[in-house]
Image: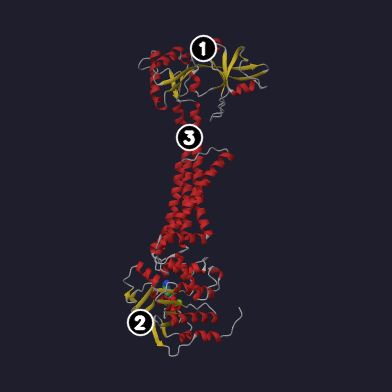
Amino acid sequence: MNIGNFFKISFKALANNKLRTFLTMLGIIIGVGSVITMLAIGQGSKKSIQSQISEMGSNMIMIHPGAQRRGGVRMDASSMQTLKLTDYKSILSDAQYVSYVSPVVQSNGQFIYGSNNYPSSIYGVDADYLEIRQLSVEDGDLFTDLDVQTNAKVCVIGKTIADNLFTNGENPIGEVIRFNKIPFKIIGVLKSKGYNSMGMDQDAVVLTPYTTVMKRILAVTYLESIYCSAVSEDMTEKAIDELTEILRENHKLLANDEDDFTIRSQQELSSMMSSTTDTLTILLSCVAAISLIVGGIGIMNIMYVSVTERTKEIGLRMSVGARGRDILTQFLIEAVLISIAGGLIGVLLGVLASVAIKMFAGWPTYIQPWSVIMSFGVCTLTGVFFGWYPAKKASRLDPIEAIRYE
Amino acid sequence: MNENVIDVVDIRRDFVVGDETVHALRGVSFTIKQGEFVTIMGASGSGKSTLLNILGCLDTPTSGEYYLDGSSVRKMSKDERAILRNRKIGFVFQNYNLLAKTTAVENVELPLMYNSKVGSAERRRRAVSALEAVGLGNRLMHKSNQMSGGQMQRVAIARAIVNDPAIILADEATGNLDTRTSFEILTLFQKLHQEEGRTIIFVTHNPNIANYCSRNIILSDGKIKEDTYTQHIMNAAETLKSLPIEDN
Ligand SMILES: Nc1ncnc2c1ncn2[C@@H]1O[C@H](COP(=O)(O)OP(=O)(O)O)[C@@H](O)[C@H]1O
Ligand SMILES: [Mg+2]
């Protein structure tokens, strides 16, 4: 018998029973669609957390004064003043695995413009800080090296500050705001970053040269922290080792002395966060695995039942001369057509559902190619197998047994 | 072609149901010559269907030999038996066994679908002429669920003759039909027998029908009780004319 006849037989069998064909396909559509949607929600949440972490900065390394706190022992004030400008200078000149470095000093207070005021922090930093935190100036300019050398009273402000001080839509650039009575000229506005994953407003910042904060506001000689960027994520460990060495040498620590500073990295933070996301991933993988199993069992059932219910038809076809392999070829073609068509529609619906969830519920969804391939593959293979297997069983019967089958 | 189209030797068929064994056939032997029109009769449960299914290669005997056209069916593979059913046997079931939701012509085409020697144009032509032969030339595109019992049975007969078989086997082909339709079907079989010389085996529980055939085998409890040749074969077409015409 030629293959054209097989396709004719299969198409007729499918077309003559549109409802059964549709219901069988529905099992596969729902199986594939729900698995894709589930995985898209899981992957989406994971990705959004990851991107929030990476938005914090680029391969960021944070150095704070004082030893690592253990068991809540309070440190005396002098131990909090161990980071000096010389440390910053040494890192700047000696560190190989660090691409950007900036000192950070901070002061809290009120910003005043006209009759508006807004409480926030002013950060004294170097221009590198913007690279480290992945900030960029949207309007105006950043302060220059000259500004740093001259302790210039210039600042770059975040969107939230601009919105709260300049309520009449004035252009902030060139305006002068006061911080604790000291006038600062605004030379730039930062590009908005929105809220971070911890719900903190990343736009409520004012940046000014670190020398300005150290000399004009705080009158201190030590730094609150030093922020660096490792040259690459892989180099973070090496960079930390190198920074430790530089600082220990600068601080003239002996071999047995503990570090009088603490180094944390974004990588550490992200691995801390990823343990949270891993729990989420495991949970969602379980949900996906269950949907896959439920979908698979659904497909299995509907295929098995619909083919088993056709045992009589199989007997009838054999009684007029169909051989076992003719029956198998027909049912295999039917199962493949139903499964692939159902699988493709399922993929389409799964993708649409993921997009709809993103649009209407606002949940982050992300469809990974492997999740599509896996759910399509598993469901179609299940469909084909359970379309083939009962047909195989039936085709081994004597025709009269198959015809009599109830 | 072998003179003895069918030769069965001591056929037995046991069915195991739970712990019990049902002996449906307890040693049946006979030969049927080319061109005979045989009825097989007997009480319900006497083994008629079981015997006919074995003759139609739809079932396998527990023991005994069955030679169809001289070759042993027992020694054949499943595929060879399938080809045999496809080329040499036309089987009419009591309950029609048509494909659901499928047109008459497609139902009749079915055996030819499994015969690669028949192309699609020839397949259609032969199905149409088989349907015309059973008087359904005007019902080609009717689906099986849009037809009466008599029409469905005629489609089943058309399907049985479309492959030009050596033997036609009918299991109570008139069992579900009213008297008039039964005689119409019987007339059809007589025509196939007399005009085309086909070998026909017709299972029935209606003793009246035996008068229209050339030979009558009576089964009782899985054995042959009587095997007689009819002296005066009656003409079904004439009986049909004499029947009162019902309005339907
Ligand atoms: N598939 C089967 N399983 C068990 N017993 C069967 C089966 N087919 C037939 N029989 C038994 O075999 C005997 C003969 O059945 P059958 O050939 O159908 O009789 P008939 O057609 O003459 O009425 C009956 O007793 C019936 O119960
Ligand atoms: Mg019977």
Label 3 sits on residue = A276
Q: Are marks 2 and 1 on the same chain?
A: no
Q: From mark 2 to mark 1, how far is it between C-alphas? A: 118 Å
Determine if residue B119 is in view.
yes
Q: Mark number for residue A148?
A: 1
- The chain to which mark 3 is attached is A
Q: Nearer the viewer, residue B225 or A127?
A: A127
Q: Find residue A32 and report its horizontal and vertical position in percent.
A: 49, 48
Residue flagged by tag 1: what amino acid is it?
Val
Q: Is residue A275 above or below residue B226?
A: above
Residue drawn where x is 52% and y is 82% of the image: B183
- Under tag 2, what secondary structure? strand
On the same chain, marks 3 and 1? The answer is: yes
Q: Residues within 10 Å of mark 3 (few under 14, many from 20)?
A: few
Contact between marks 2 and 1 (CB within 8 A): the answer is no
Which callout, 3 or 1, points at the residue further toward the start of the chain?
A: 1
**Towards the viewer: B222 or A348:** A348
